[in-house]
Image (cartoon, helix red, strand yellow):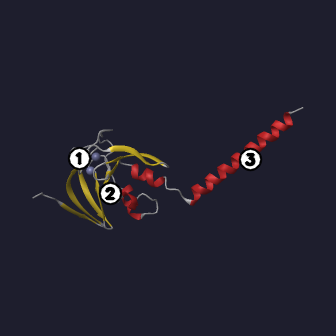
């Protein structure tokens, strides 16, 4: 029988969980918002544990649940282990670090056994910030045309420079 302490705060339900933070070893707190449960290091470094397939529900900037997670407070002075982190669920399994995706170079830790993903404090915000928006696509197009224009100018100048 595992002793759990239930806390209730408006809009969310929390239960102190047995899992420990892979980065700073504080106890993780299970947080339920809109039916999704994630384990958060609230007393420590602010990292978040996502079970397999949970992360893709919050990684886009328009997804509301992610907003609540990004806004969570944490202790910025928490001492964290930079690498060789163990999965908080699978005993003795070391997580592997890799980029979130080719266009989002945020390093995340993934458990090769259960497929869960660990994000350090602030990493979810970073991933969500990198969601491409219409604005980003417009800017990319603008940069492309600017470059063409600069190349045209350079060619014109080169032609004029000739005797
Ligand atoms: Zn932590
Ligand atoms: Zn695992």
Determine which of the numbered discs, if any, sits on residue 147 in the image: none
Sequence-wise first label, 3 or 1? 1
Q: CA distance from mark 2 to mark 1?
A: 22 Å
Identified at 40% across, 49% down, the residue is 123
Q: Is mark 1 within 8 Å of ligand 1?
A: yes
Task: Label 3: state its secondary structure.
Answer: helix
In this rendering, the label closer to the viewer, 3 or 2: 2
Residue designated by label 3 = 149
Which image quarter is the C terminus in?
A: top right
Where is residue 157 shown, x and y percent of the image?
81, 38
Sequence-wise first label, 2 or 1? 1
Where is residue 72 shown, x and y percent of the image?
34, 55
Q: CA distance from mark 3 to mark 2?
A: 46 Å
Where is residue 48 shown, x and y percent of the image?
32, 52
Q: Relative to residue 63, is residue 135 drawn left or right?
A: right
Residue designated by label 2 = 52
Above or below, comparing residue 5 to residue 162 in the picture: below
Residue positioned most to the left: 1
Task: Label 1: state its secondary structure.
Answer: loop
Identified at 12% across, 57% down, the residue is 3
Task: Label 2: state its secondary structure.
Answer: loop
Residue positioned most to the right: 163
Residue designated by label 1 = 26
Q: Is residue 42 visible?
A: no
In this rendering, the label closer to the viewer, 2 or 1: 2
Q: Number of marks in the image?
A: 3
Where is residue 146 shown, x and y percent of the image?
70, 48
Residue 22: which quarter of the image?
top left
Give neighbour class at mark 2: few <14, some 14-19, many 20+ (Cα, 10 Å): few
């Amino acid at each position: 029988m595992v002793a759990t302490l239930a806390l209730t705060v408006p809009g969310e339900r929390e239960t102190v969980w047995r899992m420990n933070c892979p980065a700073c070893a504080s106890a993780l707190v299970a947080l339920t918002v809109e039916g999704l449960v994630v384990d958060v290091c609230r007393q420590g470094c602010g990292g978040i544990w996502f079970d397999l397939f949970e992360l893709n529900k919050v990684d886009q900037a328009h997804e509301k649940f992610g907003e609540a997670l990004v806004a969570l407070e944490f202790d910025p002075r928490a001492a964290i282990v930079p690498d060789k982190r163990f999965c908080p669920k699978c005993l003795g399994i070391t997580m592997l670090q890799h980029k979130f995706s080719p266009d989002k170079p945020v390093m995340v830790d993934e458990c090769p056994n259960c497929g869960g993903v660990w994000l350090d404090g602030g990493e979810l915000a970073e991933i969500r910030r990198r969601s491409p928006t219409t604005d980003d696509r417009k800017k990319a197009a603008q940069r492309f045309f600017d470059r063409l224009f600069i190349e045209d100018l350079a060619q014109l100048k080169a032609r004029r420079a000739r005797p």
